[in-house]
Image: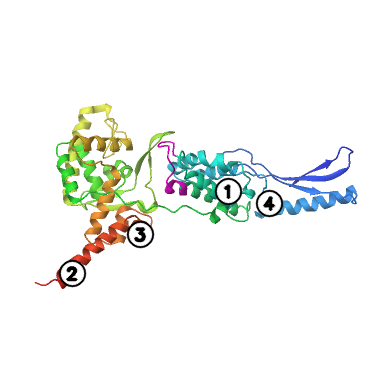
Amino acid sequence: MANIQERRNKDGKLISYSVRVHRGRGPDGKQLKPYTATFEVSPTWTEKSARKKAEAFAATFEKECREGTISDSRLKFAEYCDYVIGLKEQRGVKHSTIVRYKELTGRIYPAIGHIKLNDLRADRLNDFYTALGQDGQNKRTGGKLSAKTILEHHRLISTVLEQAVKEGLVPFNAASRATLPKAERKEVNYFQPEQVVAIREALESEPLKWKTLVHLLLITGARRGEVLGLKWGKIDFEAGKIHICNSVLYSPDIGIYESTPKTPTSNRFVALPAETMLLLKQYRAWQTQERFRLGGYYENQDFVFAQDTGKPMHPDSVTDWLKKFSKRHDLPHINPHAFRHTMASMLYFNGVDSVSISKRLGHAQVSTTSNIYAHIVEEADQKSADILADVFLKKA
């Protein structure tokens, strides 16, 4: 029931009523600020009449609050954003996403955190996005933020305001009316066939563990965390395929941890050639010998690629090893994701369709694959045109 309190002036005359409606507690257990309203008293009313009218107003106000058709005009963006992030975490949003949300608030809160939800307008957001595109915003380089990073800030703000619309706190999502920077299309980094040959030749002199790991990155097109999350129980040697359903990630607050793949469609089966399955068998035999040699020191958690203790590897260890590997063999800079792009590119150049490639990569939508590899598709189409010209148009 709404709480009603009288307000009187210094002469003791009744001038208004303060109405408060309890909102309950947030995901963190803390009491949320109540909805509040003020009911002004006309000088011509008797106190009895004023009380009666105030109680009727309070009942209507409470009903609107419960139905989500009234807003709390005092609620500020930072306070509500914390609530939404907490709600997302409670609903099972991935830890890495929650961590990223909290990182983004580091720039969002100083700019708009103090603004009341009802006062936030598109022009204020436009000013903020423009400021993010100025030099000095990138703490690592001292330069400006990329359009991609600016859009990440926008998406969080939009997510928060969309929740506010659902809860009846604001009439519309101001972020939907903002003018956004144009996202730059970055050409993907992939290896040419001769570079792949050079990498494979260089791997022959490297430890079997790393040779197998890099081989899987190239053949599966899996993300590095997905390869590190692979377990022996998810390899079907008879069918020649692996089940990608686990990922190893790192976060400064909790360290190395296991999670599900990036999206629901990232949980997938990937077929592998006979050569890859043979390499995995050789590596499994080597790993079994190592486990026997290490004895009780090795804690078997079934990971295909693990630390010497048997525990999952740090994802950055793959990136660091590849960096040193490329320098040792005088190869171009190698990052794990380049193998993913290389696999997809080679499939496009060999006539495989976007649907099949998207499924192998584990993208949520085929359009995601098509957008990322748009220039590869164009190159592959040109190659097809040249082949057709050779076959049909050139004279013998």
Kindly identify which numbered label has been placed on residue 389: 2
Residue that appears at 39% across and 51% down: 263
Specify which label sits upstream in the sequence, 2 or 3. Answer: 3
| Camera-nearest residue between 135 and 344 | 135
Q: Gap between marks 4 and 3, in whole Å?
A: 42 Å
Q: Which residues are magenta?
A: 138-151
* Amino acid on which disc 3 is placed: Val
According to the picture, the residue beneath numbered tag 1 turns out to be 124
As helix, strand or loop, the secondary structure at mark 4 comes to: helix
Percent across and percent down for residue 149 are 44, 46
Q: Nearer the viewer, mark 1 or mark 4?
A: 1
Percent across and percent down for residue 391 are 15, 70
Badge 4 local density, few (<14 within 10 Å), some, or many (20+)?
Answer: many
Kindly identify which numbered label has been placed on residue 204: none
* Amino acid on which disc 4 is placed: Cys
Name the residue furthest front.
Answer: 135
As helix, strand or loop, the secondary structure at mark 2 comes to: helix
Q: Gap between marks 1 and 4, in whole Å?
A: 28 Å
Q: Is residue 150 highlighted in magenta?
A: yes
As helix, strand or loop, the secondary structure at mark 3 comes to: helix
* Amino acid on which disc 2 is placed: Ala
Kindly identify which numbered label has been placed on residue 65: 4
| Camera-nearest residue between 160 and 302 | 160
User: Can residue 27 be seen in the rendering of this structure?
Assistant: no
Q: Is residue 288 highlighted in magenta?
A: no
Residue that appears at 58% across and 43% down: 112
Question: Are the two marked residues, 2 and 1, in contact with CB atoms closer than 8 angstroms?
Answer: no
According to the picture, the residue beneath numbered tag 3 turns out to be 366
User: Can residue 48 be seen in the rendering of this structure?
Assistant: yes
Along the horizontal axis of the image, is 31 left or right of 13? left
Along the horizontal axis of the image, is 253 left or right of 294? right
Main secondary structure of the magenta stretch:
loop
